[in-house]
Amino acid sequence: MRSSEMADEVTLYADGRSPFVCRVKIALNMKGIKYKNMEEDLQNKSGALLNYNPVHKKVPVLVHNGNPILESLVIVEYLDNVWERVPILPQDPYEKAAARFWAKFIDDKCIPALYKVFSSKGEEEQVITEACEQLQILEDELELKGKKFFGGDNINLVDIAADFIAYWLQLLEEATEMKLVTRSKFPKITEWAEGFVNCQVVKEMLPPRAIMLAYYKNRFGKI
Amino acid sequence: MADEVKLHGVTGSPYVCRAVIALNLKEIKYEFVAEDLSNKSADLLKYNPVYKKVPVLVHNGNPISESLVIVEYIDEVWKGVPILPQDAYEKAQARFWAKFMDDKCFPAVFKAVSSHGEEQAVGEAHEAFQFLENELKVKGSKYFGGDNINLVDISATFVAFWVGAAEEALGIELLPKDKFPKLTEWSDNYVNCQAVKDSLPPRENIVAFFKKRFGKA
């Protein structure tokens, strides 16, 4: 317990539907950190958000005792530095580097490739192939690790970074009636996803299925 | 126990240079394994199967990929000159700006260079530079890291060195001094830091590279 914990003021500028915001919420929940949630209307961003994040004007933004921290994975690492209980990153420098590598891979390669499939209405073979290639890399990593999560027996930075794949992707597939991650093609990812969304600290933070389905149906329609 | 440190790279890469600067800052002895990117070594493909790119740091047989991940690893394993701030909030700020370099700045600069200074592309690069200019103004210090270089300065190596080389090679202006006085001053100081000076490739090589890759026929 941090000695100044009683005086800590933690505010999260959020959009409950966002997987990036959810990463931060999972981390906050894991560590049992009390915070105030400020839900943003992204069509009408608050003055506070624009003040705290003039560069990107995006959520999530975490404000800790008046200091803003931006970028979901930067925020998660910050929380891990400041609140040491229930560690999110491995202790060992090499394993820590590996975790950062995989989290970055998910952000730089996986998620963009997946979004492209749905935003291009699944019409381009090449786009689907590319997305499946990235998923296969994750599938192989899970196979190699042979554990329940990327973090081993417990979730870590990588699992949190991959939250989109565990939950949002499935709802996107359902809304657009386009399946990428089948159990037969990606058994490890399927199993991992089921385990991840059933973690207590994760379950409590996920937005309701109905909300995401409605949002995706509206945004992408049937493919 | 003797540490074995190898860095797979190419001398012309600003990403590889980040790792070299970090190694030199900490005075780490290492072996530079020069790669031919048109004929990658079996080792490189084994060590970085996901991206098949440089730089890759191999420490006692353990490979680490992605330049900023490598720099943070180096900072954690070898004490001495610190690369990241100690304070958690300042650390988060440094990581934010390093990410900004890669996510916004670099792509904008690349577009401006590859389009031979096309107006809109240069405009976008200037937008990115303006954030850096403002940050230096607000900080009021010699470097993004204060009196000494840190992760942010290192991540911005391409701005300090590669941009100037591209300007010369292609006869375009990307970083005008009158518009970005702080960033220009920072660049001049940065390339004169000992650890950086020791790490940069010869300028004429980079100029030649840009002429060859992007120059008009």
Image (cartoon, coloured by chain):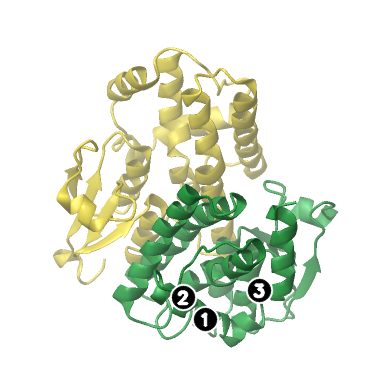
Residue A172 appears left or right of A11: right
- Which residue is tagged 1? B188
Mark 3 lies on a secondary structure that is helix
Instruction: Give the chain letter for yellow.
Output: A
- What colour do you see for chain B? green
Compared with residue B132, is residue A182 higher up or lower down, i.e. above or below? above
Which chain letter goes with mark 1? B
| Residue visible at 64% across and 70% down in the picture | B17
Q: Do the residues under discs 2 and 1 have CB atoms within 8 angstroms?
A: yes
Tags 3 and 1 both on a single chain: yes
Compared with residue B60, is residue B45 higher up or lower down, i.e. above or below? above
Q: Position of residue A119 (x, y in %)?
A: 47, 25
Label for residue B20? 3
Q: Earlier in the sequence, mark 3 or mark 2?
A: 3
| Residue visible at 78% across and 51% down in the picture | B45
Circle 2 crowding by C-alpha within 10 Å: few under 14, some 14–19, many from 20: some
